[in-house]
Image (cartoon, rainbow, N blue to C red):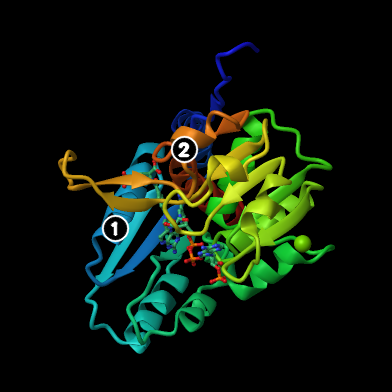
């Protein structure tokens, strides 16, 4: 290899998501031709968080692009748990809605678990209902929906030709929406999975054993070059805003991985932005299409 160090292949999530969106669009068109109807996604947003509004706007635009109908309910940050539950029940009963997404986090004082459990499992396109998560975990059971971000991570690995069977995978983070289901999915792909979390004694030592790292700890650039074995594949889920006066928005996004340094030792790596994020939205469209097809083709 000589003096010049090798640099990782950049896994282009934005491009892969574009390819998948085109596949979804043609399936939506086809469903419409056969049934005269299209899948519908309802998004519930509570409060005025800037980042939530940005994500919701992106989801709406993505729906439009592939021909999925989108429905919206914006509640004020002062909304009560009962009001949120009522909105969920209304969408549960609406035959034009095949997927319901309640944007997280919900305001303090609202019981998220209770709200998520209220979503009809047939419309749980986030895959956050305990029954869907339970089935994801259990052999012999298949969930109706797999959570979008972890599903997007696996899709990125597969479409990049990364062999998973028998590999050591380390997931950094164990949240219900990313880390835990990501670990479950990697296990299904026959990886040997280790999960690192905030009480892990020596995360660097654990990560150094990994052939594949999925970083989802929400801590800017935590995974350093000396945490990564040469040739490892890195999937960076993190989206952290850091102050940057040179940017128009006053901040820029960085991942949970020190991208500039880690790319010198990894064999492949996802960028932030343009890696996992666009895939998350794409998997949401995919889950909504599946749900719509299931309901409309009956
Ligand atoms: N690109 C995308 O589509 C998405 C991106 N994200 C991003 O992914 C990241 C993770 O999100 P999410 O799972 O919701 O976050 P959470 O805050 O819910 O979970 C973070 C997890 O990381 C662990 N953790 C936190 N700090 C450390 C540390 N210093 N060392 C080891 N483990 C640590 C926590 O451990 P413990 O359990 O012990 O507290 C927890 O399990 C965020 O940056 C978020 O913005 C999230 C969703 C989608
Ligand atoms: N019920 C629920 N479901 C979710 O799936 C959910 C949620 N709540 N709450 C918040 C997190 C976060 N999340 C992201 C989605 C897309 C990008 C994304 O597309 N990011 C772009 C950049 C976007 C930008 O420029 O700000 C990228 O990485 O390229 C990021 C993060 C979904 N989440
Ligand atoms: Mg199962």
Residue under the image location 42 percent in, 36 percent down = 274
In terms of secondary structure, where does tag 2 sit? helix
Residue 156, image x, y percentages: 59, 37
Kindly identify which residue carries mark 2: 259
Residue 1, placed above or below residue 112: above
Instruction: Give the quadrant of residue 206.
Output: bottom right
Whether residue 235 can be seen here = yes
In the orientation shown, which residue stands out farthest toward the top? 2
236 or 275, which lies in front?
236
Compared across the picture, whether 298 is left or right of 140 comes to left
Contact? badges 2 and 1 (CB < 8 Å): no
Report the Cα–Cα distance between label 2 and label 1.
22 Å
For the point 61% across and 71% down, the residue is: 199
Q: Pointer 1: what residue?
A: 51
Q: Residues within 10 Å of mark 2 (few under 14, many from 20)?
A: many
Residue mark closest to the camera, 2 vs 1: 2
- The residue under the point 29% across, 67% down is 73
Q: Is residue 259 above or below residue 89?
A: above
User: Where's ligand 3: which quadrant?
Assistant: bottom right
Residue at 37% in and 43% down: 62
Q: Quadrant of the C terminus?
A: bottom right
Q: Quadrant of residue 157?
A: top right
Residue 38 in percent (x, y) is at: 44, 48
Where does residue 32 sit, x and y in percent of width and height? 47, 41
Q: Is mark 1 within 8 Å of ligand 2?
A: yes
Q: Secondary structure at mark 1?
A: helix
Place of residue 67 in the rendered image (x, y in percent of width and height, measured from the top left): 39, 41
């Amino acid at each position: 290899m000589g003096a010049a160090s090798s640099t990782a292949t950049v896994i282009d999530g934005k491009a892969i998501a574009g390819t998948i969106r085109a596949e979804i669009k043609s399936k939506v068109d086809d469903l419409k031709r056969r049934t005269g109807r299209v899948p519908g996604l309802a998004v519930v947003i509570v409060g005025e968080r800037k980042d939530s509004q940005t994500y919701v706007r992106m989801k709406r635009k993505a729906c439009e692009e592939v021909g999925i109908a989108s429905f919206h309910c914006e509640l004020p940050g002062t909304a009560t748990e009962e009001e949120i539950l009522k909105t969920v029940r209304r969408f549960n009963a609406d035959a034009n809605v095949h997927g319901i997404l309640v944007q997280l986090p919900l305001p303090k004082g609202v019981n998220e678990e209770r709200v998520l459990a209220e979503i009809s499992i047939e419309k749980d396109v986030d895959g956050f209902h305990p029954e869907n998560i339970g089935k994801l975990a259990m052999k012999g059971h298949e969930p109706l929906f797999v959570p979008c971000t972890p599903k997007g991570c696996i899709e990125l690995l597969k479409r990049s030709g990364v062999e998973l069977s028998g590999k050591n995978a380390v997931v950094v983070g164990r949240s219900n929406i990313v880390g835990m289901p990501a670990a479950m999915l990697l296990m299904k792909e026959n990886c040997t999975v280790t999960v690192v979390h905030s009480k892990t004694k020596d995360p660097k030592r654990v990560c150094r054993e990994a052939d594949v790292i999925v970083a989802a700890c929400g801590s800017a650039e935590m995974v350093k070059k000396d945490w990564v074995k040469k040739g490892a594949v890195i999937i960076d889920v993190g989206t952290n805003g850091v102050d940057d006066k040179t940017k128009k928005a006053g901040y820029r996004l960085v991942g949970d991985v020190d991208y500039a340094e880690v790319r010198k030792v990894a064999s492949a790596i996802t960028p932030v932005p343009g890696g996992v994020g666009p895939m998350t939205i794409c998997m949401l469209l995919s889950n909504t299409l599946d749900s719509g097809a299931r309901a409309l083709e009956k």
